[in-house]
């Protein structure tokens, strides 16, 4: 960790094809856990303790003059950002929005972590563009999946499953006819009206009358 106790990790400018991950968490313990797991997978890790520090690192801090704000941008290569949701000053959701508003970093996958499994929170983050949402404690299996995002294996979590009905017209007619002939219980006749609970009740009433 640097002398100011804020940023730790691999220095920029090192020539490497490793996945570079920016980890954001106000908890020192959680930052160390994330660093250790990512380094097991040979990832480069830069850890910061707040959303504001992450913006400064990316050069997106609007409170600084451009010459200061863009100090880290030159030669900066970040493949993945993983951030805690609940942090003082700026939440992980707010950081996510800032990153997705940036023309420079909007394509970087962002993963949100939280110790609380709150579905509305998860949905909101995914709708805003988060790549994934992980419930703490973070495990090695989670980090292995995250590395795939960093190397281009992105998955659109908001894409609905394909519910298109199969095209039965392309099936050979001989197959369906042979199936009907070989199965006595299957009949091409229309379904019985007794299948409906409401109609079944009406028929019972009519019988008693």
Image: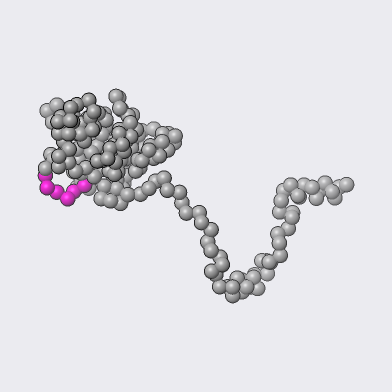
Q: Residue 19's x, y, as percent? A: 21, 47
- Residue farthest to the right? 209
The residue located at (26%, 34%) in the rendering is 24
Q: Is residue 149 visible?
A: yes
Q: Residue 121's x, y, as percent? A: 41, 34
The residue located at (45%, 49%) in the rendering is 160
Q: Give the prevailing secondary structure in the magenta stretch.
A: loop
User: Which is more toward the observer, 150 or 57?
Assistant: 57
Where is residue 113, by image quadrant?
Answer: top left
> Relative to residue 208, is residue 1 drawn left or right?
left
Quadrant of the snapshot with the N terminus: top left
How many numbered tags mark residues here? Answer: 0
Q: Residue 78's x, y, as percent? A: 21, 42
Tell me the colour scheme of the image.
one colour
The residue located at (71%, 62%) in the rendering is 190
Looking at the rendering, the stretch of residues picked out in magenta corresponds to: 14-19
The residue located at (17%, 41%) in the rendering is 76
Q: Is residue 85 visible?
A: no
Whether residue 190 appears in magenta in the rendering, the answer is no
> Relative to residue 52, is residue 71 drawn left or right?
left
Whether residue 18 appears in magenta in the rendering, the answer is yes
Position above or below: 155 against 94: below
Position above or below: 192 against 171: above
Q: Residue 167's x, y, as percent? A: 53, 63
Where is residue 5, by image quadrant?
Answer: top left
> Relative to residue 10, is residue 187 drawn left or right?
right
> Relative to residue 31, is residue 16 drawn left or right?
left
User: Which is more toward the observer, 29 or 133?
Assistant: 133
């Amino acid at each position: 960790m640097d002398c100011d106790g804020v940023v730790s990790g691999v220095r920029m400018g090192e020539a490497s094809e490793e996945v570079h991950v920016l980890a954001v968490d106000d908890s020192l313990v959680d930052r160390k856990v994330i660093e250790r797991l990512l380094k097991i997978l040979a990832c480069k890790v830069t850890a910061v303790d707040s959303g504001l520090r992450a913006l400064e690192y990316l050069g997106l801090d609007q409170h600084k003059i451009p010459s200061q704000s863009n100090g880290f941008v030159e030669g900066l290569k970040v493949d993945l950002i993983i951030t805690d949701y609940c942090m003082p000053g700026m939440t992980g959701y707010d950081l996510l929005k800032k990153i997705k508003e940036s023309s420079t970093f909007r394509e970087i996958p962002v993963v949100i972590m939280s110790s609380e499994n709150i579905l509305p929170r998860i949905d909101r983050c995914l709708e805003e563009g988060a790549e994934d949402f992980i419930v703490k404690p973070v495990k090695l299996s989670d980090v292995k999946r995250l590395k795939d995002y960093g190397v281009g294996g992105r998955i659109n979590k908001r894409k609905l499953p394909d519910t298109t009905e199969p095209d039965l017209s392309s099936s050979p007619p001989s197959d369906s006819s042979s199936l009907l002939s070989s199965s006595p219980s299957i009949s091409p006749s229309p379904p019985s009206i007794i299948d409906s609970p409401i109609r079944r009740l009406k028929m019972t009433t009519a019988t008693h009358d």
